[in-house]
Image: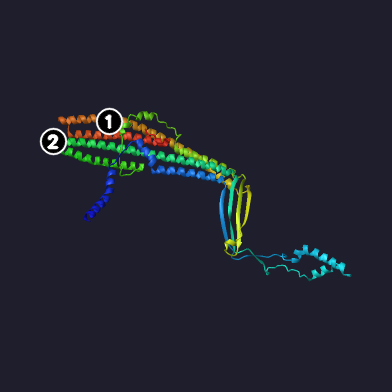
Amino acid sequence: MKRFVVSRKMICAVLVLLPSFAFSTRAQETIVLTLDKALEIAMTESPTVKVADREIEKKKYARKGSYAALFPQVNFSADYTRTLQKQVMYMDGAFDMTSMLAPITEPLIKGTDKTIADLVPGYKEGTLAENINANIPKPEPSEGGSEGISVGRDNNWSLGFSAGMPLINASLWKSLAISGLDVELAIEQARSSKIDMANQVKKSYYGVMLANDSYRVFKDSYDNAMENYRDIKNKYDQGLVAEYDLIRADVAVKNLEPNMLQAESAVTLAKWQLKALLGIDLELSVECEGMLEDYKTLLFDDYLSTDTALAGNTNLKQIDLQSSQLKKTLEMQKLDFLPTLSLSAAYNWSAMNNDFKFKNYQWNPFSIVGLSLSIPIYSGGSRIQRMNQTRVTMNQLAIQRDDTKRNLQLAVKQYMDNMNTCLKRYEAARRGVGQAERGQLIAQKRYETGAGTLLELNDSELALTQSRLNYNQAIYDYVVAKADLEKILGKDTQKI
């Protein structure tokens, strides 16, 4: 029994620790990303892109639903009404039985009267008819206070099917074309979301690369400072250098350490931002392949081959689709002046009774079929005013398109100018790195031989660090400006 208790405790302990084991295992997994791979993940896993794709699907269903208006609409209905107070009907002269039976009684009376005249001598023909008419009371007409006749029954039931469909409706047919443009607009909006997402992923990926490169620069500078500190400490222990040099070397290390730690934190933050954009777990370990320097051989050729045409710009395309929708809407509004013809049919059953004995009910069927022609004549000018509103909106959209195009052309020129400036900065930084590396090497040799000072060595290290940071920043600014330019030009996931 004791073994069973111990075994159960062990099982419970394992079950408790399993989530931490799984988390630890997952946290140790490392995903190596390229820019193309990151874009591919973003296009499939990003919530923004998924929402845009669902919007396209919704518009497609809406278009299919609009076509349903062309088909017959069949409905079943059932009605029940309870009569609380029956309607009373009054009928003047409706109960004059003499008048109602006159076609039957008059021939009989005349025949009888003639028979009597033939059999009875001295009988005057017509006497019988006169006596009968004289003794029949005349009916009094119904008045407001007179008794009426209650009409109807307590329970009234009605159920049946009805159907209808348009035969001629020009405005309805035109509305189907508008629903098709809705789908095209949703597709273009989804493409806009993907372009925007690609732009964000590129810039975030480049941000990770910049953070990694900056960290490497600070790490190399820190390692050089540590190496100099060890060398100076060895010389100080041997009495070859003054204590001031040792203090300066130690201070240089301490000054570089916060920059290195801040750069390391920037790498972590940049990776979090990238993972959030890609829609993946923030706890997963991610490494971005490559360095900013990998793009240096493409910069000049890429700048010269850049196509600045706005044919693929998504904003202009959306405005053009909206303009097409307005044109179709105006045509549809003009068609509202035409007649419409529709077909309707119904088949119903009705029953009336004073109780709820359904088995005794008598259901009476009736059916109808008909055509309905509607010819618009006058509506107070509402149709004309709707058309005027649509025309004004079209003019507004045309003005908006011209303004948008001008702003886009300005943005393209600005990005191209930024890229050109980045190329010049890159070239200057490249030469600066070369000179800084040579200067640092000379300062190192001068200090080792005693011809130089520690201050010169620290200055050369600082100059080399700054020139490398400028070098990386120039490449980063170029690729970011190129990514923004691609967004303006409407390029989906193309990378430089």
The residue tagged with tag 2: helix, strand or loop? helix
Q: Is residue 91 above or below residue 23?
A: below
| Between 106 and 418, the one nearer to me in the picture | 106
Q: Is residue 22 above or below residue 217?
A: below
Image label count:
2
* Callout in the foreground (1, 2): 2
**Amino acid at pointer 2:** Asn
Q: Position of residue 381 (x, y in %)?
A: 60, 48
Q: Residue at label 1?
A: 432
Q: Residue at label 2?
A: 234
In the rendered image, is residue 466 in sight? Answer: yes
| Between 95 and 145, the one nearer to me in the picture | 95
Checking the image for residue 475, the label placed there is none
Neighbor class of circle 1 (other Cα within 10 Å; few <14, some 14-19, many 20+) is some
Separation of disc 1 and disc 2 at Cα?
32 Å
The answer to which image quadrant residue 229 occupies is top left
